[in-house]
Image: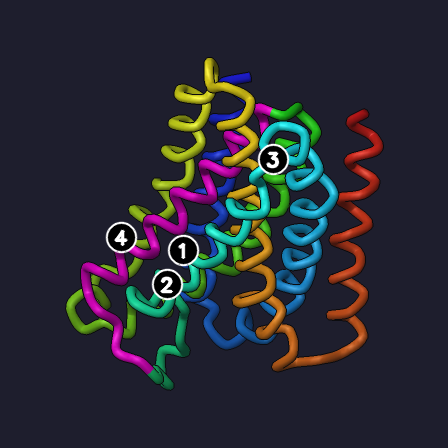
Amino acid sequence: MFIEVLISGALAGLATVVGAYLFRFFDEKIKTRTVYVISFAAGLLLANAFLHLLPESFGLNSYWPFFVLGAIAVFYFLEQTIIIHSCQEEHCEVHAMGTMSLLGLGFHSLVDGLAIGVSFEVNFAVGLIATSAIIFHKFAEGGCTYSLLVCDKALGKKALFYSWLVALATPIGAILAFIFLRQAPDNFLGALLAMAAGTFIYIASSDLLPATHKKSNWLNILLFFAGMVFVALLGQFGK
């Protein structure tokens, strides 16, 4: 199981780096197509949260609603105070806050890795679904990470280097989850699954879906539902 967790975390981190480099070298061409990846990722994240993570948490921890809501509240607080939302390089509406913004991005990436590790604790199929959702999300997020770092005068010159640091937090989170969850009680695992679900719901609802509305078309809609169907089918295959 460790190898699966390690590979999944590494692939998710690599997706962040790939997204950053694509935004760096193919800026305008990539930006016009990223919305399709975002649409698919939103469907993946929401379906994974509601079809797998939440149902698994029900039987493990009776306080699961509080952990879902808590995760959403924490991410909202972080985005309001540390500013981990992206902005267009030439149209920055906010001023990034240097080291604090970088720490916020790193924490976000670490949580994604933890979600991967927690999902594999349920079973291989759920772990694979979570990894797929996070990889598509991280691909788009990599470009957002690079864009935000470029906006900061102190970090902009080394935006790609810091993107690598942010990406590294994902496999680290996955490994930490694997190490510390081996002997964890069921109620603790249920709490983490609920928090992972809350994180996925927040990311999809706050970051991804609003971005798809900026360029609305039928392909966006199709890819959004395709992401949901993919999760549902993969879940049946893993039973």
What type is the residue that disc 4 sits on? Phe
Q: Earlier in the sequence, mark 3 or mark 2?
A: 3
Question: Which residues make up the magenta segment?
Answer: 94-121
Residue indicated by mark 4? 161
Q: Earlier in the sequence, mark 4 or mark 1?
A: 1
Residue indicated by mark 1? 74
Residue indicated by mark 3? 62
Colouring scheme, one of rainbow, by chain, secondary structure, one colour: rainbow
89 left or right, relative to 200:
left
Depth check, front residue: 80 or 87: 80
Q: Earlier in the sequence, mark 3 or mark 1?
A: 3
Image location of residue 209, percent across then percent down: 62, 69
Image location of residue 115, percent across then percent down: 51, 38
Q: Secondary structure at mark 1?
A: helix
Q: Are marks 4 and 2 in contact (CB under 8 Å)?
A: no
Residue 128 in magenta?
Answer: no
Q: Earlier in the sequence, mark 3 or mark 4?
A: 3
Vertical arrangement, residue 213 with respect to residue 13, above or below: below
Compute the Cα span from label 3 to label 1.
Answer: 20 Å
